[in-house]
Image (cartoon, rainbow, N blue to C red):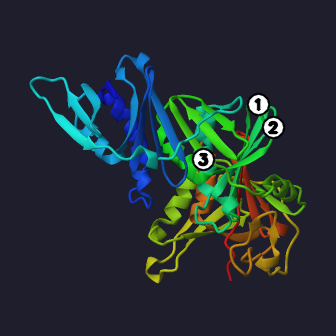
Amino acid sequence: MKFKIKSQLLLTNIKRIIKISPSNPINEIHKNLKVEVETNKITFSSLNEKGFLNFFILTEEEKLEVYETGKFLINLKILYEIINKLKDEWILFEIKINSLVINNFDKDNNFTFKLNTLDINNFPNLDFNKSNNPITITKKIIEEINNQINFVINTNNSNNILRGINFSFSKDSLLITGTDRVSMAQKKFQIKNETFNQDITIPIFLLNDIEKIANDIDSNYYFYLNDDQTLIIEIDNFLFKGRLIEGQYPKIQNVIQQYLNSNNKEIIVINDLKTFLNTIELAVVLAKKEIIPLIQLLFDKTNKKIEIICISNNNSFGEVHEQFNNVTFLTKTAKQEEFITVNPTNNNIDGLQEQSSSLTILKQEQEDKFKIVFNYYLLTYALKTFIKCKQVTLNIISNYNCHTIITSEEEPTLTQLVLPIIKN
């Protein structure tokens, strides 16, 4: 085996693999890189606990020349550390008696590295056969999924199906859903799809790895769904392969429609989202060091304002009150003199559940005032997904314990659902 390659070309690609390489791998094979040299290309393969990665470099790029074919297995990080120290120059790789010899062509600054190769039979054969026509998903769609959906996924969720994002394909659309049973995000995209019409749930770990490697690659994503419930995603010269999560994803769309069809809800339009977010940020400035800052929103329809109060568990912080006036109240619910106590073990609708064991509406002071407490992070993350919008609408469903659905006419395909904190 013998080839020469420009060091920066090799380094650019190996850096991508390093980004998803486990720092303390349990299995030794996760430390290694398999290199297969063919006449027209070189293929590099690695794997971790989440999936397989394969990328190739073609000889037609004019920064690679192959003299002899072959293959070898090498420690990934050792190879990276060597290549990372080099300037942009031609380097020669050659196998000599079970050792990989690396040297350059600079007579004034010549170097030679001799590395022991590993037993290539210990590395599994990775099948990257693309068995059907792909679905094309643009980079813009992937970016919006990362920015507007991913944040709701809890990687420590005890329910395995909720550690992934659901992709529901139809002939002309793609519906993306994520939930952790406390919050929910959903967005619909228009795509061309003649390949398959079904739901798949992709592990968030796999999607995060792809984002780390391909975030600066300006290319479409191609999805290949195999019969063995594995998914191959192709981006430029990279191929990712991972196993899909089996099981039925919660039918969030049904829940949303049920809530929105409720006759007992408040519809509140935030007319200046950026100012509203800034007001919330100021209100929690004293509680930022807490694990979960809480904010109480007092909706005052008579005076057409929202009072924002930081709720802190630390008495030394004191209390912060802020006021937001650029708001429109479109409806009002019937007056409620009594409050309903919720039993969370019996309050689970298609996968959404309560966070504690008491009341959602803290106090219905009078017909035109009501208070709700939110987890600061859940509420602001959901609102920030609409950051390009001027206005957003809060649909507060009174008879469903103030589950809050956030929408915007400026971005009608995006929906966020946030459950309030239930407070004694």
Q: Position of residue 123 (x, y in %)?
A: 46, 47
- Report, in whole angstroms, how far the alpha carbon at label 2 lies from the one at label 1: 7 Å
- Residue pointed to by mark 3: 242
Q: Position of residue 206 (x, y in %)?
A: 57, 49
Q: Amino acid at mark 3?
A: Gly
Callout 2: SS: loop
For the residue pair 410 and 334, the one nearer the viewer reads as: 410
- Residue pointed to by mark 1: 193
User: Looking at the image, is 224 positioned above or below residue 275?
Assistant: above
9 horizontally vs 392: left or right: left
> To which quarter of the image does residue 2 belong?
top left
Q: Amino acid at mark 1?
A: Asn
119 horizontally vs 178: left or right: left
Callout 1: SS: loop
Q: Disc 2 vs disc 1: Cβ atoms closer than 8 Å?
A: yes
- Residue pointed to by mark 2: 170
